[in-house]
Amino acid sequence: MSFGSDRNKFREEKLKERFEFEKGRTGGYELIYPAPGETPESKEKNKRYETYIKKANDLWDEFTTGRKTLKDDKFEFTDDRNNK
């Protein structure tokens, strides 16, 4: 077994423990993300929620830093001060 597969196995075990812990503490609320199962509907729901989560993270970054970040954009910063 390689380090990567051990790491993935450990991560999966910890996620399972987390979901079991959270399942008993939902306070009557329904878990909507991640959608359980491997059905096309659950995969579509997860994809939609991941879009919401990404946008929420982008908005939070913009709110807390005062500017938009270029995490996913292909952008190369050039410092023109050294070229003068």
Image (cartoon, grey):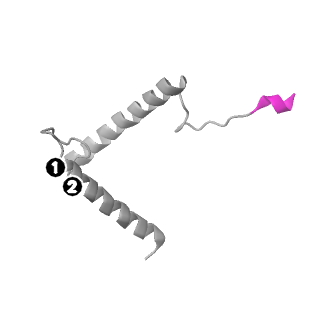
Q: How many marks?
A: 2
Q: Amino acid at mark 2?
A: Glu
Name the spot of residue 8 as percent of width and height, x first: 39, 64
Task: Say whether residue 5 is left or right of residue 14.
Answer: right
Name the spot of residue 4 as percent of width and height, x first: 46, 67
Name the spot of residue 41 as percent of width and height, x first: 20, 45
SS of the residue at dot 2? helix
Q: Amino acid at mark 1?
A: Gly
Quadrant the C terminus occupies: top right
| Residue drawn at x 22%, y 46% as measured from the top left | 35
Name the spot of residue 17 as percent of width and height, x first: 26, 58
With respect to residue 18, does 80 lie above or below?
above
Q: Which residue is mark 2?
A: 20
- Determine if residue 38 is in view: no
Q: Which residue is mark 1?
A: 24
Q: What residue occupies the far left of the structure in this picture?
A: 28
Q: Which residues are magenta?
A: 79-84
Task: Say whether residue 82 is left or right of residue 44.
Answer: right
Query: Was residue 33 drawn as part of the magenta stretch in this picture?
Result: no
Q: Chief secondary structure of the magenta span?
A: helix
